[in-house]
Image: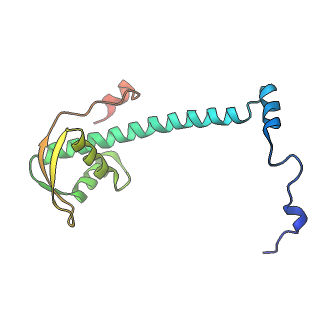
């Protein structure tokens, strides 16, 4: 691959390194400038957070259903992951483990680690169903599980 001549690598006038005066002119003209991009990022983040809440809630329900189905006995983390994948679909491998730890921290379940090297756990107690996130539609809640 040939290198571009040095003349082409220089910035064209007005194409880069626009300063505060340029942003102020855009703002006065109503074209938004930096503010418009910031607003788009805020909207995207809130949409992403809503999607994360929805997916986390589904994984949460699947983990609780698994805990109820096994009762008070030992299980391997791979069993939990397979169950969640069967109920929810493809999820990140660590998500069911993370949700399991979160459920224990919130007091909804209780378990002990029997063997960390084998990822073997013993379920001690299973509590009530977790509350739905606020931004999840009621119809979608009914459709889940």
Left or right: 21 as drawn, with respect to 74: right
Residue 41: give x, y in percent of width and height: 59, 37
Q: Which residue is drawn at the image coordinates 45% and 38% (left, top)?
A: 51
Q: Residue at x 57, y 34 (%)?
A: 42
Q: Which is more toward the observer, 83 or 11?
A: 11
* Quarter of the figure that contains the N terminus: bottom right
For the rendered model, the colour scheme is rainbow
Location of residue 79 (image quadrant): bottom left
At x 28%, y 49%, the residue is 84
Nearer to me, 45 or 16? 16
Decide which of 12, 137 is in the foreground and name it.
Answer: 12
**Which quadrant of the figure contains the C terminus?**
top left
Tell me the quarter of the picture where residue 4 sits: bottom right
Q: Is residue 109 above or below residue 35?
A: below
Q: Is residue 32 left or right of residue 42?
A: right
Residue 12 coordinates in the image, percent (x, y): 88, 53
Image position, residue 24 (x, y; %):
79, 31
Q: What residue appears at the point 34 percent right and 50 percent down from the top-left corner?
A: 95
Q: Which residue is farthest front?
A: 20
Where is residue 133? Give x, y as percent.
Answer: 35, 30
Please count the marks in the image.
0
């Amino acid at each position: 691959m040939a290198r571009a001549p040095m003349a082409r690598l220089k910035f064209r006038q007005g194409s880069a390194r626009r300063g505060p005066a340029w942003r102020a002119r855009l703002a006065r003209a109503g074209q938004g400038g930096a503010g418009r991009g910031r607003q788009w990022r805020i909207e995207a983040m809130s949409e992403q957070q809503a999607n994360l809440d929805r997916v986390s809630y589904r994984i949460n329900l699947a983990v609780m259903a698994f805990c109820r189905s096994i009762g008070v006995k030992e299980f391997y983390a791979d069993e939990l992951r397979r169950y969640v994948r069967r109920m929810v679909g493809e999820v990140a491998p660590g998500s069911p483990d993370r949700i399991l730890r979160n459920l224990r921290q919130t007091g909804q379940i209780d378990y002990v680690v029997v063997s960390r090297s084998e990822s073997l756990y013993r379920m001690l107690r299973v509590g009530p169903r977790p509350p739905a996130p606020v931004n999840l539609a009621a119809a979608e809640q009914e459709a889940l599980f």
